[in-house]
């Protein structure tokens, strides 16, 4: 007999989302919504699909990144440049709550799918518009991708080492943060709709969430004229904060943000007098003298193998964590206990596929991954014919695969 948790509806059950976006940011937004039960229909180009199917690594020609980003969604095909494709989107939004798009400014309007048209069909429709630079401003016409946003927002400029080039992140940071923001703003707009009964457009550029997350740079420059420069793993507002190499040539990340934490760290490392050094008496002094502090800590830390160091820090209630690679994450007992990685059966790959699990553990109505990213057009018959009422012959003649 199912438990209450298993039987309870998911938090977003009954919410319908139409995802006509490509690549990362928009589809990540709908991924988070689908994780918690929203009915997400992903619209892809016939024959080729979303280009993310061809990004990154593949197994037997099947793109693995697509499998993660588009989990729990249905895939239907529609060429939005054709009258039939436009009609498919119009029928999809008729009873939808949210539509997510990331086309260049003016593209939907050119196709006859602007919000003015879609809101006539469904006044309660919420449109999430994720573009490189937003729908307004002198750059709004420019194409934009996450890499451009990471530079434009100021992230790359502060990342790296003094005297070295700015560094971009090793993953799609701007797209991913925009995906999170898109899901959050969709829920904000949905909450407002519950009061007013009206939909609206939510517009933001993918550089904007990352810009907001960059910390006190704006207030520091506004009030003090400070421009943050590249300084490795150090932070301009707390010290110590860095990565340190252990005796067995592994790495740990350490932060001593609170004075008590810093003192316990020094006790654990057998250097209890360091907090009394005039250079390191408080956080502001430590920031000013962070190179000397890092050198002192590195000398102490490299006397220990990583596991011994972590056990020592735990005994002293000091803060440290391993700098894990993905193999170490797969082997980590805490990741296992938290079920941060889950196996999902996949028809296309012919077996289980492990991926990151849903974030957030609800005590009563948890999210769940039901399936990985779908085969292109696998829901064409269910959605286009059974739900939207299109004629099978018309679709077949237009080249739409139905089985």
Image (cartoon, helix red, strand yellow):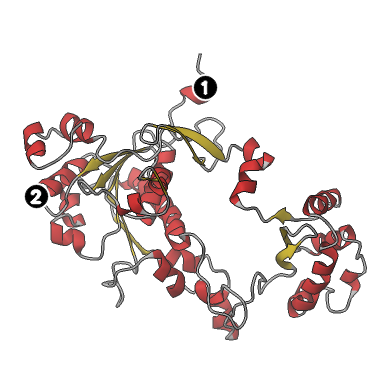
- The residue at the point 38 percent across, 56 percent down is 25
Q: Residues within 10 Å of mark 2 (few under 14, many from 20)?
A: few
Asked whether, in this view, residue 113 is left or right of residue 31, the answer is left
Residue 236, relative to residue 225: is it above or below? Answer: above
**The C terminus lies in which quarter of the figure?**
top left
User: Which disc number belongs to residue 124?
Assistant: none
Q: Secondary structure at mark 1?
A: helix
Numbered mark located on residue 4 in the image: 1
Kindly tell me whether residue 257 is visible in this rendering.
no
Given residues 256 and 70, the one toward you in this image is: 70
**To which residue does mark 2 refer?**
83
- The residue at 46%/25% (across/down) is 8
Mark 1 or mark 2, which is nearer to you?
2
Question: Given the current orientation, which residue lies at the most extreme bottom position?
Answer: 225
Q: Residues within 10 Å of mark 1 (few under 14, many from 20)?
A: few
Q: Is residue 321 visible?
A: yes
Q: Position of residue 75 (x, y in %)?
A: 28, 40
Cβ atoms under marks 1 and 2 closer than 8 Å? no
Tell me: 191 left or right of 331: left
Residue at (9, 50) in percent of width and height: 83
- Could you say which quadrant of the image residue 287 lies in? bottom right
């Amino acid at each position: 007999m199912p438990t209450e948790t298993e039987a309870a509806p998911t938090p977003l059950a009954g919410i319908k989302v139409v995802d006509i976006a490509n690549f990362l940011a928009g589809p990540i937004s709908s991924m988070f919504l689908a994780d918690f039960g929203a009915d997400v229909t992903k619209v892809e180009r016939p024959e080729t699909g979303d280009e993310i199917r061809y990004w990154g690594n593949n197994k037997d020609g099947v793109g693995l990144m697509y499998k993660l980003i588009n989990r729990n969604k249905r895939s239907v095909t529609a060429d939005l440049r054709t009258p039939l494709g436009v009609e498919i989107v119009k029928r999809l939004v008729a009873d939808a709550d949210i539509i997510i798009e990331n086309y260049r400014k003016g593209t939907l309007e050119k196709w006859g799918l602007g919000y003015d048209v879609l809101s006539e069909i469904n006044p309660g429709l919420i449109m999430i518009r994720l573009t490189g630079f937003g729908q307004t401003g002198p750059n709004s016409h420019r194409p934009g991708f996450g890499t451009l946003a990471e530079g434009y927002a100021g992230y790359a400029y502060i990342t790296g080492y003094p005297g070295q080039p700015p560094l971009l992140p090793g993953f799609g940071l701007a797209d991913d943060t925009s995906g999170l923001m898109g899901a959050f703003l969709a829920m904000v707009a949905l909450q407002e709709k519950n009061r007013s009964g009206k939909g609206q457009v939510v517009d933001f550029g993918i550089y904007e969430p990352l810009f907001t997350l960059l910390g006190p740079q704006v207030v520091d420059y506004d009030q003090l004229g400070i421009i943050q420069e590249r300084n490795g793993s150090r932070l301009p507002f707390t010290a110590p904060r860095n990565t340190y190499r252990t005796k067995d040539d592994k790495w740990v990340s350490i932060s001593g943000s609170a004075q008590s934490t810093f003192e316990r760290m020094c006790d654990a490392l057998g250097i209890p007098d360091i907090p009394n050094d005039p250079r390191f008496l408080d956080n502001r002094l430590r920031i000013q003298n962070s190179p000397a502090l890092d050198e002192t800590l590195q000398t102490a830390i490299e006397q220990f193998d990583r596991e011994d160091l972590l056990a020592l820090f735990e005994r002293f209630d000091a803060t440290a964590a391993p700098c894990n690679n993905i193999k170490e994450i797969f082997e980590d007992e805490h990741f296992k206990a938290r079920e941060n990685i889950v196996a999902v059966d996949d028809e296309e790959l012919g077996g289980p596929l492990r991926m990151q699990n849903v974030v957030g553990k609800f005590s009563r109505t948890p999210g769940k991954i039901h399936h990985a990213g779908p085969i292109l057009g696998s829901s064409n018959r269910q959605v286009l014919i059974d739900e939207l009422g299109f004629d099978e012959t018309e679709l077949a003649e237009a080249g739409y695969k139905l089985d």
